[in-house]
Amino acid sequence: MVVLSALALFATACSTSGPIAADDAWARESAMMQSAAAVYLDLTADEDDALVSASVDSSVAPTVEIHETTEMDQGGDDMDGDDGDMGDDDDMDGGGMMQMVPVDEVDLPAGETVSLEPGGLHIMLLDLVEPLEIGQEFDLDLDFESGETLSVTVEVREGGPSERSSSLLQPSCSWPAAATTRSTSTTSPMGRPTTS
């Protein structure tokens, strides 16, 4: 009877509007003088939604932005470098110059897993109070266009994601991966170029 009730609850959760799952939230350890770090995770929403902002406790970083790593246009050399010595997006396999640009939001099409990962979309922690150390954990609060909010625990690792962890608003089903974003206006890059 308990099993049937649990299955019924799960089925209801997968069909109701608004459930969002955040899986495997992690950040790479940062160097002593590094002032910025990136957080990566997978997001899945049962209904169309969008990630619009993120935040952490001020004891970790006072400013948090959503960024995307893109390839610079040929001849572009006006890099500001104001993001600090960011080395987290070093998994690019091209030889071109890369830049990080802020995005207004990350679209979450219904039933599709959107990956924030090295070399692509990520959440930037700016002006780190202290370097991120292996084994450290901190809370990341996510705000969505629908009004939903989600708090996830971010694990600091030496390299990349290992064991999967999950933080849910409600139980969620699993679907294939896809991602779309809407970018801000074309302003000067927010970080230094990185290469593979």
Image (tube, rainbow, N blue to C red):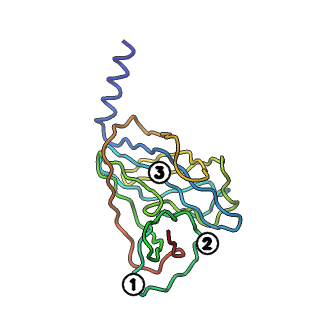
Q: Which residue is mark 1?
A: 74
Q: Position of residue 33 (x, y in %)?
A: 70, 68
Foreground of the two, 10 or 73:
73
Residue 8: horizontal and vertical position, in percent?
Answer: 32, 23
Marks 3 and 2, the one that precedes in the sequence:
3
Q: CA distance from mark 3 to mark 2?
A: 22 Å
Q: Residues within 10 Å of mark 1 (few under 14, many from 20)?
A: few
Q: Residue at x 54, y 50 (%)?
A: 26
Tell me the element at label 2.
loop
Left or right relative to 57: residue 185: left
Q: Amino acid at mark 1?
A: Gln
- The reply to whether dot 1 and dot 3 touch (C-beta < 8 Å) is no
Q: Is residue 117 left or right of residue 108?
A: right
Identify the amino acid type marked 3. Leu
Q: Disc 3 on helix, strand or loop?
A: strand
Residue 3's x, y, as percent?
37, 17
Residue 84: which disc?
A: 2
**Label 2 sits on what residue type?**
Gly
